[in-house]
Amino acid sequence: MIEPRQRWVLACPVLQLDTLTNSHDLEHPPHGVIVFHGTQVPAGSGAPHRIQSSLNFAEQFAEQMSHVLNMLELSSETEERGDGRPGDDI
């Protein structure tokens, strides 16, 4: 639902990344979607510029969030295996 005073909404998927290729893992659905909204129209001349700006922002944000979640998953897997934890025999 969008309230009347909201002027724009931007939704960004949070993708799962393949650890080997560092690209979207097509075997798994996204982790979820993060949504931004605002009451001010983005700066720029004309709708095409605003749309492109929004798409660029969404792509950058989704990519960064995907990398962060991927690193968290790898870190959790490493901890579960006991790799590199202090006190473990190597």
Image: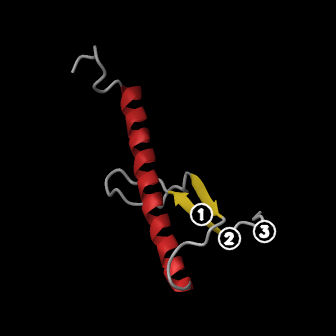
Callout 1: SS: strand
Quarter assignment of residue 4 = bottom right
Residue 76: image location, x then y, percent: 42, 33
Mark identifier at residue 19 = none
- For mark 3, what is the residue? 4
Please say if 79 is above or below 12: above
Asked which secondary structure carries label 3, the reply is loop
Residue position marked by numbered label 1 in the rendering: 11
User: In which quadrant will I find the N terminus?
Assistant: bottom right
> x%, y% of residue 48?
52, 85
Q: Is residue 25 visible?
A: no
Instruction: For label 2, count other residues whose C-alpha is less than 10 Å away and answer few (under 14), some (14-19) or many (20+).
Output: few
- Using residue 51 as the reference point, say whether residue 25 is left or right of it: left
- Spatial CA distance of label 1 from label 2 is 14 Å
Which element carries disc 2, helix, strand or loop? loop
Residue 90: percent from the left, percent from the top? 21, 21
